[in-house]
Amino acid sequence: MIFLFRHDWNRLAKLYRTQEAPPLNFSRMRSGSVGLVYYKGTLNVGITPQGIYLSIFLLFRFGLTPLLIPWNAIRKIEPANQLFIKRFRLYLSSPKVSLILSKDVLEPAKEFLATQGFEWI
C-alpha cells in the first residue's frame, strides 16, 4: 500500500523535486490527485511563474519531497468535475502522470497556462 501511495509522486520527484520555499499564494490542506492517489485534505498547492508547487501536509509526508512542475510539462488540460466541485485534470508530458486540482486552486495559474496555449475553461 505504501508503495502505491508513493509511486507516482516519486516518479515526478525524479524530474521535478525542489528545495524552494512554498510560494506566497500557497493553499494548504487541499484535496486533489497525483496519479492514482487521491490526497484528501493533505495536498498543499502553490502557483509560481515557474510552475505548480506541490507538497504533502507534514504529518503525512512520509519522505515525499516537494515538487515544482514547470508549465511546459503540461500537455493537456480537461475538466474533471465531481458533483458541484469544478476540477481540472492536467496531463503531464513526462512522466505520463495526471494531476487533478480544483478550479479555485488553479485560478492564479490562469495567465501562466495561457502562455502555454491553454484557454481557461
Image: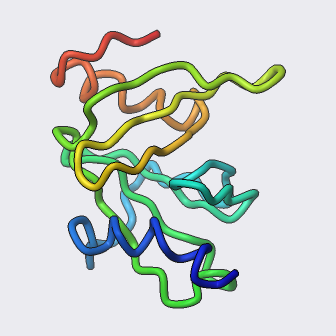
Q: Nearer the viewer, residue 13 or 19?
A: 13
Q: How is the image coloured?
A: rainbow
Relative image position of residue 79 (x, y in whole percent) = 55, 19
Q: Left of 43 or right of it: where is 41?
A: right
Q: Nearer the viewer, residue 84 or 37?
A: 37
Residue at image point 68% right, 85% down = 59
Q: Residue at x 76, y 26 (%)?
A: 82
Q: Quadrant of residue 19?
A: bottom left
Vertical side of 107 occupied by 9: above or below: below
The image shows residue 60, relative to residue 39, as above or below, that is below
Residue for point 56% across, 39% down? 101
Above or below — where is 81 with respect to 99?
above
Q: Percent x, y for residue 73?
A: 21, 43
Q: How many marks?
A: 0
Q: Residue at x 31, y 43 (%)?
A: 92
Q: The N terminus is located in which quarter?
A: bottom right
Extreme residue in the right direction: 83
Q: Classify residue 101 as left or right of residue 38.
A: left
Q: Position of residue 10 (x, y in %)?
A: 40, 75
Front-lying residue, 42 or 99 = 99
* Left or right, 53 with reference to 26: left
